[in-house]
Image: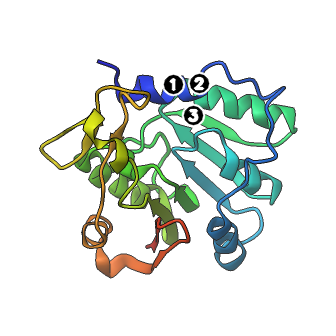
Amino acid sequence: MCSSKQYWESRFDGLNPENYDFSQSKPLTELVDFCHKHLHPGETVLDLACGGGRNSHFLAESGYQVYGVDFSESAIEFCRKRFSRFSLPGVFKVGSMDHIPFPDRSFGAVFCIAAIDHVRYEAAQKAIGEMRRVLKPEKLMLLTFDPLDTDQDIADQAELLDDRSLNFIKGEHRGLIFHPYIDNEIRTLVGNDNITVFEYLEDGSRLVVSR
């Protein structure tokens, strides 16, 4: 059976930043707005589950001190080469969101975009705790959760796990985990009293800003 790690490795394995078209690799608009509203110039920020680095790229170009973490070694290698190609400063490490490889109170903001619903619920709970651990006091994290109908059209390719996560066992998404959160589950996971923003994006994703 293909593991979740193998799935994400396959997404970036073989990609070459030297001939990659970055014109469509734009940052999340709401992340840009958040930075303008909440961050000081030069703030140290973490892009958790950074993938190919589209948000990290914007953050570095905007003058923030960027650190990226992803459990895909090929994604981290892609980000390092991407930053080298564009002469951008940044530090990228292989690691998981439920064991973030940085000390307590390291960051002025943590971003986790379209990722926390691609681990099982227990790992997501640990990830929220880890994000709070590495945040500086009174600072914020920004997360997004995929639309509820994401991957439902191919749900017959997945097995339902005991925590209601879907584990795709065949097809091109084999190895992918997806936990379809309803709004109340998001509030429970993150902690409703800690949430300062909860809103729907145009594509149906949910955006959460939390202490």
How far apart are labels 3 and 2 at the CA level? 11 Å
Of the residues under marks 1 and 3, which one precedes in the sequence?
1
The residue where tag 1 is placed is: 9
Instruction: Give the labeled residue for mark 3.
Output: 93
Looking at the rendered structure, the kind of residue marked 1 is Glu
Disc 2 on helix, strand or loop? helix
Disc 2 marks a residue whose amino acid type is Ser
- Report the amino acid beneath label 3: Lys
Query: Could you tell me which residue is drawn at 75 percent across and 55 percent down?
Result: 58
Query: Which of the two marks, 3 or 2, is nearer to us in this view?
Result: 2
Determine the secondary structure under disc 1.
helix
Q: Do the numbered discs 2 and 1 sit on residues whose CB atoms are within 8 Å? A: yes
Q: Which mark is residue 74?
A: 2
Q: Residues within 10 Å of mark 1 (few under 14, many from 20)?
A: some
Residue that appears at 48% across and 53% down: 114
Q: Quadrant of residue 4?
A: top left
